[in-house]
Amino acid sequence: MIKVKTLMVYESIHHGNTEKVAKVMADVLKAELVKAKELDINLVAEYDLLGFGSGIYWGKPHKDLLHTIDSLPSLTNKQAFVFSTSGAGEKGSNKAHQLIKGKLIEKGFTIVGEFSCRGFDSFGLLKLIGGINKGRPNEHDLKEAEDFARRWQNS
Ligand SMILES: Cc1cc2nc3c(=O)[nH]c(=O)nc-3n(C[C@H](O)[C@H](O)[C@H](O)COP(=O)(O)O)c2cc1C
């Protein structure tokens, strides 16, 4: 059995929603989990599979995640998955995922999966109504994140 060595890179600045999803996936995959700014890009070569995740802010992933991806060297034989949480769920993350995937493909990654779910959002005026998606990601979302990650789980 070949072991898949996984590194996950993320940003989660609003309510830690994306971090919750990232932690569940990292547990399944026994992955290293680092914030985008803290990634030592020289270590990337040691991993087979990389996960890139972010909350969605103004339709985009966090800029630190994008900068980190931009700063990676060109790579070969690396797989990547993309994940996010957003106020609008899949609809809110679509364009942002396209942006991340485009950059990763340019760097030589093969995209092998993507995951998104809703996250508690109390930004701006939403605060006045107590926010939307309270409690999200919830147990069901986290179970889906776990199931998503299982496809690369080392047995
Ligand atoms: C500044 C800001 C902008 C946001 N813009 C969007 C957006 O364009 N689309 C969307 O669906 N959600 C948007 N959201 C909601 C977040 O994507 C959602 O709350 C997400 O789960 C936050 O993840 P985090 O807790 O990991 O930071 C925004 C939140 C903030 C704080």
Image: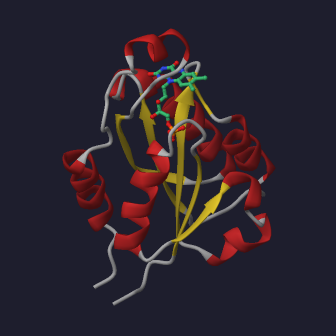
- Location of residue 114 with respect to 75 vertically, above or below: above
Position of residue 123 measured from the top left corner of the image (x, y, whole percent): 53, 20
Residue sitting at x 43%, y 37%: 85
Q: How is the image coloured?
A: secondary structure
Quadrant containing the N terminus in the rendered view: bottom left
Position of residue 3 measured from the top left corner of the image (x, y, whole percent): 42, 85
- Location of residue 32 with respect to 18 vertically, above or below: below
Residue closest to the far left:
140
- Position of 111 with respect to 44 (left or right) is left
Name the quadrant containing residue 86.
top left
Count of all numbered marks drawn on residues in the image: 0
Position of residue 102 measured from the top left corner of the image (x, y, whole percent): 59, 36
Residue sitting at x 68%, y 68%: 44
- Location of residue 139 with respect to 127 vertically, above or below: below
Position of residue 155 measured from the top left corner of the image (x, y, whole percent): 28, 85
- Location of residue 4 with respect to 58 vertically, above or below: below
Q: Depth check: 80 or 38 in front?
A: 38
Name the quadrant containing residue 33.
bottom right
Name the quadrant containing residue 141.
top left
Residue sitting at x 47%, y 23%: 122
- Position of 12 with respect to 70 (left or right) is left
